[in-house]
Structures are given as C-alpha cells and as structure tokens.
C-alpha cells in the first residue's frame, strides 16, 4: 500500500490526546480541503509502496500500544482490511482517522471522524465542485457511528461555523454530545490560542469539547510529529 510516512509521537487530538502512538499515514485522498495540514497526502500526494509484512514489523517494534492509521483518507485503501485485523491480533489498539466519506469494514477500536463542512471547500475551480459532491455521505456516517466506538472532530475557522455543526448533527441524533470535538483551524501556536479562546465557551454551551492540537502546540505543525 502507498504510505506517506510512519512515525512515533503523541496523539495530538481528540479522546486520546497525549497518548504515545505509532502513526501509519496513507497517501491519497478523495477530498481537497483548503486547510489540509498534510497536503503531501492530498494536493500533491507522495509516498512509497509498503508491504503488509513490513508495516506489521514496524508495529511489533514500536514501544507503544496505540496505532493511529491516518491519511490522506485511509479508508480508500482496501489493504487496510488485513492490516487492521493483523494489528489487532497483536494486541494493539487502533484508531482510524477518516473524513467519513468512504465505508470499509476495517477493524478499529476508535473511529475518529472529521466531517467536512462547507467551510472546507477549496477555491481551486478544478476541485471545488468535486470536493463538494464528495464531502458529505450521510449513510457512511451513520454506519461508522453505529458500528464503531467513535468521535467526531469538526474543524472550526470562524464562530459562524458552529451553526453549520448544529445543522449537520440534526441528521444524526444518535450521536451523543460528549463524542463531539471542535478543533480550531490553525497552522501555528498563536492562531491556535486565539481561536481556542473564543471557541471554548461556544463549545461548552452545547456540551461539546474543544480538542487540543498538541502537534501544533509542541512541534509547530511540522511533518512527522
């Protein structure tokens, strides 16, 4: 399978923020969010072909129990089925990070879904309409949030984006408020702090959580962290 990078670090976002983790990042994505923080897996995808055995050897050698499979969009990769089954058989816990537009019956202990709202649409005319057609798949979201332990992480750029989250969640009344995380759209520490200040009370009023973004706080959004 096509892998952009693998590395050990701390999970930066969501329920397991701060947990030592091995990251396996696939390359290739069906969306083109303007704020994508891994353009080397989407806008200009790059990577190397890795075998199932070589990835499992890396999992065995890692000194952590948590494996995060991310992208790009990892659920585009059919080989994830045997890979996740084998990782789980090793006793590791698996988080899958996905936009929730593709359904693949992988093995996962946490399905970490980052739905893409209208605020994700790029200006690029080549991708604008294609992105908008693909970014919302309600049937996929219902399946993933019903069959897996899950969390939903929404990227928030402006206060008005919370109205879009409110509207989005009316389609999925079975998703409990404690599973909802808001993430400030930010590329550096100063922007992250500024947006977190106004986002925190807006989230609290809805019984939602603001997710940390530890990779930005600790490493400044550098690759491989």
Image (spheres, rainbow, N blue to C red):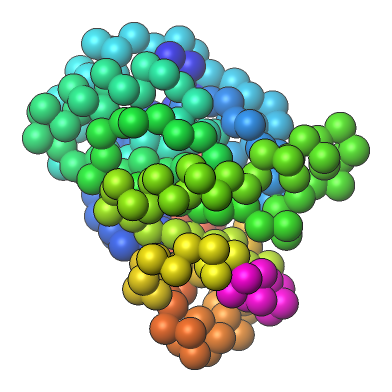
Q: Residue at x 50, y 26 (%)?
A: 76
Horizontally, residue 92 falls left or right of residue 157, namely: left
Q: Nearer the viewer, residue 13 or 96?
A: 96
Quadrant of the snapshot with the C terminus: top left
The answer to whether residue 46 is above or below residue 181 is above
Horizontally, residue 166 falls left or right of residue 16, namely: right
- The mark tally for this picture is 0
The residue range painted magenta reads 158-167
Does 162 appear in magenta?
yes
The answer to whether residue 187 is above or below residue 41 is below
Query: What type of secondary structure mainly makes up the magenta span?
Result: helix
Q: Residue at x 36, y 71 (%)?
A: 176
Q: Is residue 53 visible?
A: yes
Residue 61 is situated, as x and y percent measured from the top left of the image, at 16, 26
Horizontally, residue 98 falls left or right of residue 81, namely: right
Residue 12 is situated, as x and y percent measured from the top left of the image, at 39, 56
Residue 224 is situated, as x and y percent measured from the top left of the image, at 45, 38
Horizontally, residue 159 falls left or right of residue 148, namely: right
Q: Residue at x 73, y 40 (%)?
A: 133
Q: Nearer the viewer, residue 30 or 183?
A: 30
Residue 107: quadrant of the picture: top left
Q: Nearer the viewer, residue 215 or 108?
A: 108
The answer to whether residue 180 is above or below residue 77 is below
Residue 163: quadrant of the picture: bottom right
Q: Residue at x 82, y 40 (%)?
A: 129
Residue 125: quadrant of the picture: top right
Quadrant of the snapshot with the N terminus: top left
Q: Residue furthest right?
A: 125
Residue 197 is situated, as x and y percent measured from the top left of the image, at 57, 84
Q: Is residue 7 visible?
A: no
């Amino acid at each position: 399978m096509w892998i952009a990078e693998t590395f050990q670090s701390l999970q930066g976002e969501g329920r397991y923020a701060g947990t030592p983790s091995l990251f396996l990042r696939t390359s290739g994505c069906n969306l083109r969010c303007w704020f994508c923080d891994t353009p080397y897996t989407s806008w200009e995808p790059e990577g190397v072909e890795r075998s199932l055995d070589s990835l499992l050897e890396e999992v065995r050698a890692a000194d952590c129990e948590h494996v995060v499979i991310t992208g790009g969009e990892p659920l585009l990769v059919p080989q994830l089925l045997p890979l996740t089954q084998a990782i789980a058989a090793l006793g590791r816990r698996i988080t899958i990070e996905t936009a929730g537009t593709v359904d693949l019956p992988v093995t996962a202990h946490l399905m970490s879904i980052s739905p893409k709202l209208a605020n994700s649409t790029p200006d690029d005319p080549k991708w604008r309409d294609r992105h908008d057609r693909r970014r919302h798949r309600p049937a996929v979201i219902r399946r993933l949030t019903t069959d897996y332990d899950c969390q939903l992480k929404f990227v928030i750029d402006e206060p008005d984006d919370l109205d879009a989250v409110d509207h989005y969640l009316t389609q999925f009344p079975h998703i409990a408020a404690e599973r909802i995380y808001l993430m400030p759209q930010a590329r550096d520490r100063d922007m992250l702090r500024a947006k977190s200040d106004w986002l925190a009370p807006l989230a609290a009023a809805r019984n939602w959580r603001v997710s940390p973004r530890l990779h930005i706080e600790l490493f400044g959004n550098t690759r491989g962290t």
